[in-house]
Amino acid sequence: MSKRILISVLVGLIGLTLLLTPLQAEKSEDVYYQDQVAVLMYHHVHDTDTSSSTITRALLQNQLQTLLSRGFHFITLDEFRQYMNGASVPSNAVLVTFDDGYQSFYTAAYPILTSLRVPAVNFVITTDLADPLASYIPSMSKEQISEMTHNTNFIDVGCHTDNMHHKLDNGEAALVGKNAGETEASYEGRVLADAQACVGKLTPLTDRPLDAMAYPYGITSPAATAQVAKAGIRYAFTISPEMATRSADHLLIPRINAGSPNITPELLVRSIQRRVVAQPGHSPLRVDAASAAAQIGGTAAVEGGALQLRLGDTAFTLEVNARTATRGDARVKLQEPVLRSHGQITIALDDLQALIGRPLVYNAATGTIAERVPLSVK
């Protein structure tokens, strides 16, 4: 039986036991943070290999299940891009990243991620694609990467350089250091060519944008960052252990380490919580209810001072200053009151999502709202 068939069978078996993340049914409604993202960093997943950056399959699954049960919401790389450019994300948002392109991502992590519907991005060292089994820790093949990115809409890849994940003779990281006698122009040309090679090798393996990178060893320099940007990289990740916020430099995005064997699920939760960026006076995101309804295929009309929304066969009545909405003959409790502001009747985005039973994304920069794309496996 081929390795691909074995992986498919394993994904299916796990999926039968954890169908569509049933743990969500028991999760907490606590909101630890809003409008920021905990970007988690992993490397190798293996049950017998040991290192400070290797965790077992059981620990990975326990970490993710715990976060799900505590009300954390996992987002895709594309949703993270949208967030950095003005869009909303769910409360307690988390982005999962893996470095190095190890084969263990395909054999050990991918089945777990798929069964739990947890999105992830793997940053690949593309020089290893030529002979994946020759590296010290076996790497993924082109076929494995292509299978994952095309069989799901939530597994992505990015660059971890083509051939710069090593130290120079002088001990400096290849991305930021210069070889003996290397000029500034030669150095910049070397970094640019490497980033272009990485993008070029990965582009045929995915239908999604190839514009994200993780710096080797988590470090960069202004000169290196400028060159990877020239190669088309728009989002680059470090290992600074902080929360990612929209105000962060898009080429210096922080990440929180989750991939060490001593990081228990409870410790990971606490690690995220203590890094939450304080938001004094932060209020729930509100949207123009009529405009939102129109953008997601509904209609709205003001009748008797109340706003009548219709989405498909369902009608809602929103009364100004009320913390309830009428849906048919039922009264639905809202977390925030409906308000009138500058001639618009506004509702908290979380309340609108709860009313219609669909996750939404609002981009304050463009004033647009849309349904969140559901995660799917072909």
Image (cartoon, helix red, strand yellow):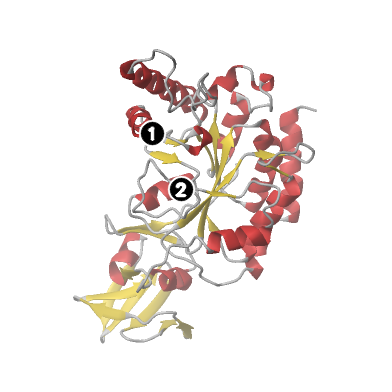
| SS of the residue under disc 2 | loop
Q: How many numbered circles are shown?
A: 2
Q: Residues within 10 Å of mark 1 (few under 14, many from 20)?
A: few
> Amino acid type of disc 1?
Ser
Q: x and y percent of residue 294 in the render?
A: 31, 63
Above or below: residue 180 compared with residue 339: above
Which residue in the protein does label 2 denote?
A: 254
Above or below: residue 369 compared with residue 190: below
Viewer-nearest residue: 74 or 222: 222
- In the image: residue 27, left or right of residue 320: right
The extreme front residue here reads 170
The reply to whether dot 2 and dot 1 touch (C-beta < 8 Å) is no
User: Is residue 98 something one can see in this rendering?
Assistant: yes
Q: Earlier in the sequence, mark 2 or mark 1?
A: 1
The extreme left residue here reads 342
Q: x and y percent of residue 50 in the render?
A: 75, 38
Q: Residues within 10 Å of mark 2 (few under 14, many from 20)?
A: many
Viewer-nearest residue: 291 or 196: 196
Question: Alpha carbon of mark 2 to alpha carbon of mark 1: how far?
Answer: 15 Å
Viewer-nearest residue: 84 or 142: 84
Quadrant where the N terminus is found in the figure? top right
Above or below: residue 177 compared with residue 328: above
Q: Nearer the viewer, mark 2 or mark 1?
A: 1
Which residue in the protein does label 1 denote?
A: 221
User: Is residue 19 something one can see in this rendering?
Assistant: no
> Amino acid type of disc 2?
Pro
